[in-house]
Each structure stands twice: as C-alpha cells, then as structure tokens.
Amino acid sequence: MAAINNPNSSSTKQPHPRDAVIVQAIRTPLCRARKGGLAQHPPATLLATVLRGVLLKDPTGTTQGPDDDDYNTNKFIVPPSSIQDICVGNVLSPPTSAVSFRMAALSVNIPHTTSISTTNRQCSSGLQAVANIAHAIQCGSIDIGIGAGVESMSTNPMHELYDKFPPEVDWNTMQQCYNSKEVMDCLIPMGVTSENVAKKYQLDRTTLDTFATTSHQKAASAQSQGKFTLEIIPVGNISNDDGIRPSTTIDTLSKLRPVFDKQNGTTTAGNSSQLTDGAAAILLMSRKEANQRNIPILGVWKSYAVEGVPPHIMGVGPVYAIPAALRKANISSVEDIDVYEINEAFASQAYYSIQALQLNPNKVNPNGGAIALGHPLGCTGARMIVTLLNEMRRERKRLGVVSMCIGTGMGAAAVLEVEDMRSAL
C-alpha cells in the first residue's frame, strides 16, 4: 500500500491566508494512573497547566501559578484575551467536565469572552479537538484558538465507565436489527479486539513482545537524551514521564500472561498501552494572523481524515485513515512522509498497521509510543502532535502524520508540515 491513487503530485497544497498554523504545542508529563506523579491531580488541574503554558513563549521551565510572573505581557505569544475558542478532547470524565474545563480556563486568566467546548471521539479525542479548532480557522469562524486534550485515568478509571454510564439504547432493537452482530460488536472490550487483530493477521506473541520492547527502548533513549524536555511543562514538581521502563526485555515480557484470551492469547499488559494521566494543548491561528503578529510558525495543519472499520477489529483504523489523509493533502505515497506518530493502543494493531501500509519502521514512533509513554485517552492525539513537531524540527523533517485507532471501529489521521524545512531538503 505504499502508493496511493492520487492524480495530484506529492507536494502539499500551496500557502493560503486562512491556513491553520500551529505556533505553540506543549504537554504535561505522562504518568501512570493511580501510581504515578499525577494521580492526585484532577483533570481540571492538568488542563489548566497546559492552557496556561501554551500561551507562553517559554513554558517548559514554568512552575509558578497563574497569578505569578508567567503572565507578564512580554512572556506571551498572544495575550489570553486573543483566544476566541477552546476545544478539549476528553473521554472518561463525567458530563460535568464541561463545567470543570470552563473553570480551568477561567482560573488561568483566560477571560470569560473565550468560549470552550468538549469533544469525545474516544482515543482520537485530542486530535479531534485540534481538528475542530483548525477547521474553524480555515473556514473563517475564528482566527485564534486552542485545541487540547486531557485525561485522568486515576480520577476516572476506564474499567468503571460502563458501570457508571452504560449505553442508553433499546437493547431489544439493537439485538434484533438487521445488522445486530456489528451493532453488538461495538461492546467488545478493546483488548479482545486486539486479540481479534492478532488472530486475523497471524501475529505471534514474540513479534508483539519485540515491538513493545522496542517502544520502551526508544522512549528510554529519548528521555535520557533530553528529547522530551522542550515539550513538557511541569505539574508542580513533576516534570518527567514515569511509565518508561528502560529495563524491559523480550524475556521479561514473555513471562506475562495474556489478559483477554488466557489460553491462546497474545495481548498482555506488557504489549498494550499503559493507563495514564496527562494533558496537552496546541495553539493555532490563521496564517494571516501569525504573519501580522510576526509569530514563528511551528507547523501547518494540512489535512485530516476519519475512516470507519469493522468494530471487532477496530485497531486497523490507521490502515485506512492514513491514506485518506494523504490524499487530502495531495501526497501520493506513504514514503513521502518523514515521521509517523501512530498510537500504540496495542502492539497487535500498531504492528499490523505499519506492515499493511508498508511503512519504514525507522520513521514510526522514533521516540517510542503509548506502550512506553502511556495512552491518556482524551489527551493522546494532542500529545502526539506535540511530540511529532518537536521531532520534526529537531531532525529537520518536513512532513509528519499523527494517527490512531478508535474504539467501536474507526481510525483518524492528520498530516502536518514544517514549512521552513523545505529549503533543507
């Protein structure tokens, strides 16, 4: 699938005043749910941290509260009053999060004139939030906005979701309709869908444990080299990701028992994404606005696509979403992309996506993925943009993709460009 049927050239679209451009991107540390450094912080605190930080020219060394020197005018990229809208991706928080997140924005001196909304497209919620703001900019509805994502899997454990909020459906109708099997497949636990992918595409346990080990090794190397430093704003005294295990080996992972198919399964806690707390935020504006304000552009939002797939193998979503996003960006081949950030919900689906698309593994998750870093559901899509842009600028790469699978059977992907790398190629 390396070639994509597209009549256009491999170059992306030409610059336009209403292009949505990214001028700042920041995240909190990603910390283990219940055991890690952010376990005692509610989602609103994590969100407030990144909403405050994303407005600053140099957020990574910031530890003061919102009423301290951070809000000296000359430290802003733009003042809070310039933000017209905020969209926050979140999956597990209750409906009252709409109130909590509004309070979080107001608490960091973003004025009441700035509107805010939440969005839930499950594992792509953070990416969807950024897409919502980017599209509002592109169509002229706003000029400046923030797309963000947050999840506290300590505060809102994933295993309690269906107990507290079961699907509100007419079960007789759902079980008796023409498409009842696919309808009911939406309830399959994510880990079982991982086993379905592994069985369907004949992925063995050693392959998946090797993939997981590599994720930890890459993340540990990146952390030791300080590659995450410029993308993290501390939360209190917590400034580092704490889920990375440098000592992980194929041998240690092989000793873990399968969770979802105890007799013949391949999916374990070790080759699945971690339950994690974290938040991330992306500051976007129109190209015209950035040029008028003389603000450096970190990246350009080029395209976004969401594709549906069978719910029982939801993990294959990137296989369909990535080509769709590339077509929208007038990119003719997966080989034209320099860096891929593909969410590692499970080693099975991430490995299969890479193989099915015939991607160069060296281009995928060069600093590790969710198996090592964690997968705070509503945050992940925004976090991946932060990591992607930092990697592309550090390594002088031009084109990047963020993609993930989505529960109930979807995949999402976005294409970003670092324009000032064109002259280096």
Image (spheres, helix red, strand yellow):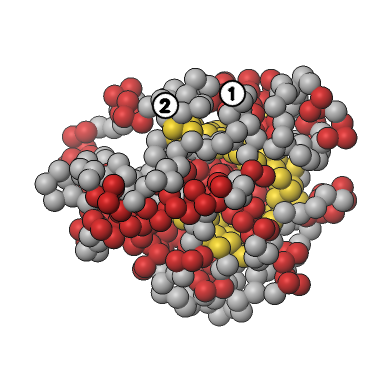
Return the residue at label 2. Answer: 35
Task: Answer whether residue 412 is visible to the viewer in this image.
Answer: no
SS class, disc 2: loop
Q: Which mark is residue 45?
A: 1
In the displayed orientation, state which residue is furthest to the left. Answer: 263
**Residue type at tag 1:** Thr
* Residue 218 place in picture, x, y as percent: 48, 54
Task: Answer whether residue 407 is visible to the viewer in this image.
Answer: yes
Of residue 108 and residue 16, the one placed in the foreground of this image is 108
Where is the C terminus found, in terms of image quarters? bottom right
**Residue type at tag 2:** Lys
Q: What residue is rendered at 23% in x and 56% in y? A: 205
Where is the N terminus found, in terms of image quarters? bottom left
Q: What residue is rendered at 72% in x and 34% in y? A: 61
Of residue 198 and residue 396, the one placed in the foreground of this image is 396
Q: What residue is rendered at 72% in x and 57% in y? A: 19
**Vertical comparison of 252 with 400: above or below:** above
**Vertical comparison of 319 with 178: above or below:** below
SS class, disc 1: helix
